Image (cartoon, rainbow, N blue to C red):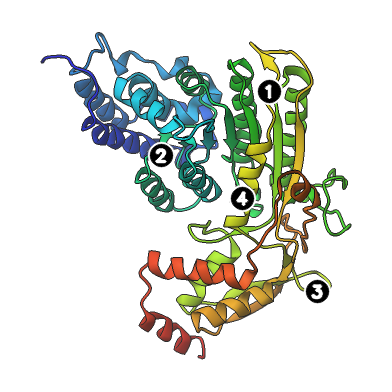
Amino acid sequence: MTSRGLLEKDFEQIDEFLHRAVTITLNIQKEHGKLLKDFNKDLVNNKEIEELKADVEKFASSFDMPGFKMSEMNSSETPHHHIHTTTHNLISSAFYGGGAAWEKQVRHSSTPRRVNGLSVLVTGAAGFVGSHCSMALKKRGDGILGIDNFNSYYDPSLKRGRQKLLAQHEIFIVEGDINDAELLAKLFDIVPFTHVLHLAAQAGVRYAMKNPLSYVQSNIAGFVNLLETVKLANPQPAIVWASSSSVYGLNTNVPFSENHCTDQPASLYAATKKAGEEIAHTYNHIYGLSLTALRFFTVYGPWGRPDMAYFFFTKAMVQGKPINVYVTQDNKEVARDFTYIDDIVKGCLGALDTAEKSTGSGGKKKGPAQLRVYNLGNTSPVSVNKLVTILESLLNVKAKKNVIKMPRNGDVPFTHANVTLAKRDFGYKPTTDLSSGLRKFVKWYVSYYGIQSKELDSSKDHSQD
């Protein structure tokens, strides 16, 4: 067979290999994830893995990759902390990290189209906030390269839908994990990024009680791995990253301000985000990295996350199913500072545009660097009951509510952002109230999921039972 380089038509085949590898790995994790030794053993001996290796070797034989043999790559040589991505990284390193066509996509996507435009690496680009920010940056002429591992914390098809939308605007998302140091180094070798917008994270307060290690792996280890790569880059890009309003934890001073105490987190998720802020301080102090943390307050809107209340309330109400509405232990209403996605995007872009350059070079600090923390909220807390009332009006459905006491699982009863600093430094000013924002969300939801008006009428009738 005549050898050749990667062609555009080959990427569908490579995608198929990647999806098979990820599916196999996730299935093994579900069965043996609690025991790394068992997981490693099953990964090596799994029949589906052997079949995948054979298919990849056959595919690779047609390329300029002499002697390439996946069967000779012993996963036992891989450190245990990389076991979860062994197969995924193996294929991404062999193809996505080495092909001329792949590099061309990376360069094309990350190249600015305006004078003095930014070149931004967006982690978590297939996520809710990441996809919206990527689109906004692209529309104004900046270069964008995304990276996302498309994990299954919530339905990956939604992430694939966002990926497809971004691809239509020539935004390329590298399928990989921020814990993959080799992949990150490869990207920084190819592209002289001016900025990193770090939005990849394990989100969700309650899920931390089910899978705590995923938060440490993504929010702490992943962040450190990214910073380790950035510190060695030349030039060092400025970093804007997503912290969370959850860091305020048990704080009772309202509205929440950046100078308030944040040493009483109420959830592991909050603790990992607080740890991130401390880690950012360390890398700023030692290596001269410019770092800006953004504390998001309950972001909502089209293409949102299905694990958020407004999203799963809508789904349940459309299906005529009951919803649980929480009240505090002393029967007070729970309220959130719901912030519409477009306002969050404006805040992210404002932070990027005002981020100063990092001062280090080759892993050494040359001078003091910028270190900032900002709240990005709506400044108008709304009760969850009010949220439900608005959804009832928009969906023309009466909700079947079960009012229950908030469990002690890390949720806090009230959030309220003071955004004075963000307004002063980059003109942040939220403009979308909850009613207007939910109207846009419901319009998207009904369209995306193909909800017919008769289904809404049916759920309305059912809810009266």
Under mark 3, the amino acid is: Lys
Q: Residues at badges 4 and 1 in contact (C-beta under 8 Å)?
A: no
Distance of mark 4 from mark 1, alpha carbons? 22 Å
Q: CA distance from mark 2 to mark 3?
A: 45 Å
Residue 339, relative to residue 347: is it above or below?
A: below
The label shown at residue 332 is 3
Q: Marks 2 and 3: which is nearer the front?
A: 2
**Looking at this rendering, what residue extends furthest in the front direction?**
115
Q: Is residue 439 left or right of residue 285?
A: left
Q: Earlier in the sequence, mark 2 or mark 3?
A: 2
Q: CA distance from mark 3 to mark 1?
A: 46 Å
Give the crowd class for mark 4: few <14, some 14-19, many >=20 residues within 10 Å.
some
Q: Quadrant of the N terminus?
A: top left
Q: Residues within 10 Å of mark 1 (few under 14, many from 20)?
A: many
Mark 4 vs mark 3, CA separation in Å: 33 Å
**Residue for point 54% across, 23% down:** 80
Mark with earlier residue (4, 3)? 3
Label 4 amino acid? Answer: Lys
Pick the front one: 350 or 86? 350
Question: Is 163 positioned to the left or the right of 223 in the image?
Answer: left
Q: Which residue is mark 4?
A: 346
Mark 2, residue position: 171
* SS class, disc 2: loop
Residue drawn at point x = 59 percent, y = 36 percent:
198
Q: Is residue 224 left or right of residue 322?
A: right
Nearest to the observer: residue 40 or residue 273? 273
Q: Earlier in the sequence, mark 4 or mark 2?
A: 2
Of the two numbered discs 4 and 1 on the same chain, state the one appearing first in sequence. 4
Give the x, y percent position of residue 28.
42, 37
Which label number is shown at residue 358?
1
